Each structure stands twice: as C-alpha cells, then as structure tokens.
Amino acid sequence: MRCVRVLTVIGVCLAAAVPVAAQSPVSPPAAETAQQALRDELDRLRREFEVIRKQYDERLLALEQRVSELGQGPSAPSGTAGTAGATGTTGTIGTAGTQDPVPAPQTPAAAPPQSSKVFNPDISVIGNFLGVAGKNDQSTQPAMQMSEVEAAFQAIVDPYARADFFLAASPEGLEVEEGYITFTSLPARLLLKAGKMRAQFGKVNTLHTHAMPTADRPLVTENLVGGEEGLSDAGLSLSHLVNNPHLFLELTGEVYGGTSAVFQSQQRSDLTYVGRVRAFRDLTEATNIDLGVSFATGATNIPSALPTGGSAGLDKQLFGIDASFRYRPLRRAIYQRLNVRTELIWSRQDTGDDLRESAFGFYTLGDYQFARRWYIGGRVDRSGRTLDASAIDTGGSVFLTFWPTEFSQVRGQYRRINFAEGTNANEFLFQVNFSIGAHGAHVF
C-alpha cells in the first residue's frame, strides 16, 4: 500500500508541474522557487521509495534463507541451531530497514530420504488359522491349527522380467510353494516362466490356500490331483496369447521334473507334461464366462494295489474340463456378485500287469455376495479314487464368509462327506485369514 501511495503522489506532482510550466508569464523568482520545491518533493519521495524497496529486499532474502535451511534436512546441534535462529531469523526480520541481514550459518546438506524401493520387493505375509469340530473317522486334523503361513516376495526385475517367491510354513515344515521368474517381453506374444510353480491344470490346482473360496479343497482334488500340495513342481511354462478383440485365448505348454505329489519319476527322463487351453469372453458388461481344457501325463511311483506290487514304469494321465461364470453388475460392484464354477477330472492310473484304473470326479461351487462384506455359498462333491474307481466319495458344503477389512476374512463352513466305506463325516470348519503387506494377485 505504501508503494501505491508513493506512486500516486509522484503522479500528482508530475501532473501539477505541467500547468505550472504552461502558465502565462510568471516572475522569474517565483518560477525558480516552484521548481526547487518540486525537486525537493521528488527527492524526498525517491528516498522514501528506496527505503521501502530495501525493506522488502531484506525480508525476501530472509525468507529465502529460511526456506533453504528447512530444505537442508536435520538442523545443526542445539547450540548452533539456537544461535542461527536468534541471529539469522529474528535478527533479519526484526531489524529490517535499519541494518543489513545477518546470514544464518549454513549446515551441511543432509542426504534425501530413501523413498524409492526399486531394489526392494513387495513383501507380504498371510496367515491361515483353521479350526474344526465334529466327527470324521478318516481325518486326523487337529481341532485348531495354524495350517499355513505364506510369505510372498514379488518384484519387477527389469523391464523384461519379474520374479515371484512364495514360502509356505506349515506344521510339516517350511517349503518353497512357488518361486519363478516370468519373462514378459518375448516375441510372438509368448510368456515364459522358469522355476517351481503350480501347474496350469484346471482351476483349484492353481489356487493357494488363502485364495480358496472355501476352508477346504474339493474331494476330487484330494483324491485325484494330490490334495493341497497338488500338481506343483519345478519346470518351464510357455504361454501364447492369441490376439482376438472378442475372445481371450491362452495356449499353455509346460514341462516339469516329475517330483510332485501326483507325478513322481524314478529316472531323469521321466518328465511331466502339462497342456492347457483357456478361453475367456465377456457376455455382457456384467457377465463373463471362462472355459478351460487341461491335460497332464507323466510317470508315477504310486505303488500298485495289486498283489504283484511294483511301481517302476507306471504312467498316469489326467484330463480336466473347467467352466466359470461370473456376474458382477458395474453399478453395484461392491455390493453384489455371483460366481459359479465346475470342474470335471478324469484320472487313468497304470497299476501294473497291463492293467489300468480309471476314476472320475467333479465339484460344482457357487458363492454369492449379498452385502458389501458378506458372501454365502455352497459346493457339491463327488469323486472316485485313483487306485479304486469303484470307491465313490460324495459330499456337500455350505459356507458363510465375512470380510472385516480387505486384509482379513472370517469363514464358517459346514461339511458333510459320505465315504465309500459307509462312514459319514459331519464337521464345522472355522477359518480366519489375515495378512500384512501388499500381496500381488494370483492367477485369475
């Protein structure tokens, strides 16, 4: 405001000088007196303007020094900091207009905080607590246990690859559930993985325990596909994505060393081969369907049930068909969704003496989200056994899941199983999943 007033006065004086100079003859002494008064007024205004400019320059310099001190990181020791504050800050601003600013002492610039984590992977830990009550004569599962703790380490290695490691600790010990590198920039839309992986056979086999929609796995998985350990082995996986704007089509071929719970080779040349074709298509903006066909073959060490025994040279084949239907309206996506899935699996196991045992099993599962954090669902099971196809186990389950937060879930499940031996199991399973850290998405 003072600058505005000064400029206004200067303008008025200049305007007044014009009529004075243009007036009719004035006596020389009077004209000289008027001109001298005008010069004195201009000199006074100039001095006042210089004082104001100096004050603003000093304050601006003090603010710049203060900002510089704040941007240098941790301050100097207490004695130095106190002196700097009294001299550099208070002295500069408090005495503005009467003395030059006293510069504050400069402290060494501190290293910037290491906010980048380019060399650190995303780390997460997921715990799976499982309790069971009821009667099951064919199960030795304890009443309560920490069935699994999974630690995940995931990171992008470089612009062309990423790495994923999943360590699983259970009552049986610690193991590498999965650990592989994925090369994402190969030509011809190829995707290559190398390491230990869960084979791309069906749907349930690819899912980790915490990602299951139920507290247990279907009977067909337990009887024919190795249970919780499943078809998991060290090997190579090569996938090709077919470029089609209306249909997602993925072709996968895999080869493994033959050390899984399903295929167990005795010789180095006895490898396990897995193939899968998967098709995904949106039906409407709220619905889609996912279809898959899988095949696996390899050698096995499973002893024969025949009196002759023997396990060398035995082969096993698995064939599976899976289908998933998903409904999720976009306008109510966080409140309502429906997933329906079924999987059919055929197993053919050599038992020696040119004999084979062929078994079949399936499950059908559906879960529905009826509120923002609540899910309800059910599952139907039926399966033969690898070495005795005539022994049919059947069962059914209903379950209710609640998500307190996005980092935990609580599930209650009632399960009934009718075993081929004529015994029944009626159990209630209670599951709590909880996690810390950023856990990457698994196979969709």
Image (cartoon, rainbow, N blue to C red):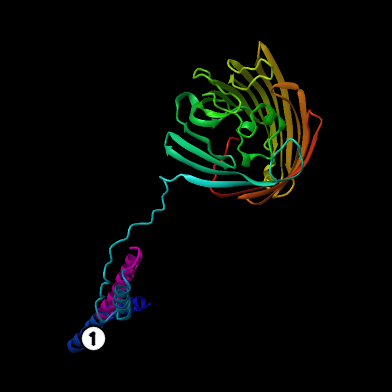
Q: Is residue 68 above or below residue 120?
A: below
Residue 72 visible somewhere in the drawing: yes
**Image: magenta residue range:** 46-75
For the residue pair 370 and 99, the one nearer the viewer reads as: 370
Point out residue 319 in the picture as x, y percentages from the top left corner: 65, 21
Figure quadrant of the N terminus: bottom left
Q: How many marks?
A: 1
Q: Residues within 10 Å of mark 1 (few under 14, many from 20)?
A: few
Point out residue 285 in the picture as x, y percentages from the top left corner: 67, 37
Q: Measuring 73% from the left and 49% from the top, which residue is drawn there?
A: 371
Residue 23 visible somewhere in the drawing: no
Q: Which quadrant holds residue 8?
A: bottom left
Point out residue 346 in the picture as x, y percentages from the top left corner: 69, 21
Q: Mark 1 falls on what kind of element?
A: helix
Q: Which quadrant holds residue 416?
A: top right
Figure quadrant of the C terminus: top right
Q: Is residue 325 magenta?
A: no
**Which residue has dot 1 on it?**
37
Point out residue 326 in the picture as x, y percentages from the top left corner: 69, 36
